């Protein structure tokens, strides 16, 4: 179904991960993935993470010049 092939550190290989039975009430949106190879490695999918806003770039090109008064 929603298997994802990811690298498992425990297995040291790329294996399909699948969503475990969720006990936290996430339902279909459960971000947890369990390695089907070892069944131990749990990975939190970061699908809901949005990148920080890159549109607003602050212009900070004012040269800093300090003179001794
Ligand atoms: Zn969950
Ligand atoms: Zn594994």
Image (cartoon, grey):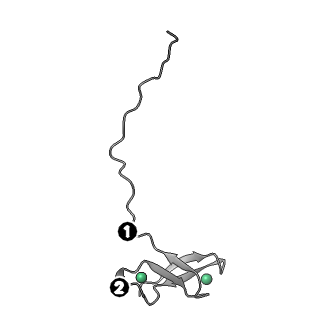
Mark 2 close to ligand 1, CB under 8 Å: yes
Q: Secondary structure at mark 1?
A: loop
Q: Secondary structure at mark 2?
A: helix
**Residue 47 found in image quarter:** bottom left
Which residue matches tag 1?
48
Mark 1 in CB contact with mark 2 (< 8 angstroms): no
**Residue 36 found in image quarter:** bottom right
Residue at the limit of the structure toward the bottom, as seen here = 21
- Residue at figure coordinates x 47%, y 88% from the top left: 20
Q: Is residue 57 above or below residue 15?
A: above
- Residue at figure coordinates x 40%, y 65% from the top left: 49
Quadrant for the N terminus in the image: bottom left
Q: Is residue 51 above or below residue 36?
A: above
- The x and y percentages for residue 69 are 49, 9
Count the marks.
2
Which residue matches tag 2?
27
Residue at the limit of the structure toward the left, as seen here = 55
Query: Label 1 to label 2, Cα distance in Å?
Result: 15 Å
Say which label, 1 or 2, has the lower sequence index: 2
- The x and y percentages for residue 14 are 59, 78
Q: Quadrant of ligand 2?
A: bottom right
């Amino acid at each position: 179904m929603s298997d994802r092939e990811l690298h498992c550190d425990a297995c040291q290989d790329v294996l399909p991960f699948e969503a475990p039975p969720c006990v936290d009430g996430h339902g279909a949106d459960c971000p947890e993935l369990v390695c089907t190879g070892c069944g131990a490695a749990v990975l939190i999918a970061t699908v809901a993470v949005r990148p920080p806003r890159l549109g607003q770039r602050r212009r900070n090109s004012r040269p800093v010049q300090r003179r001794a008064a």
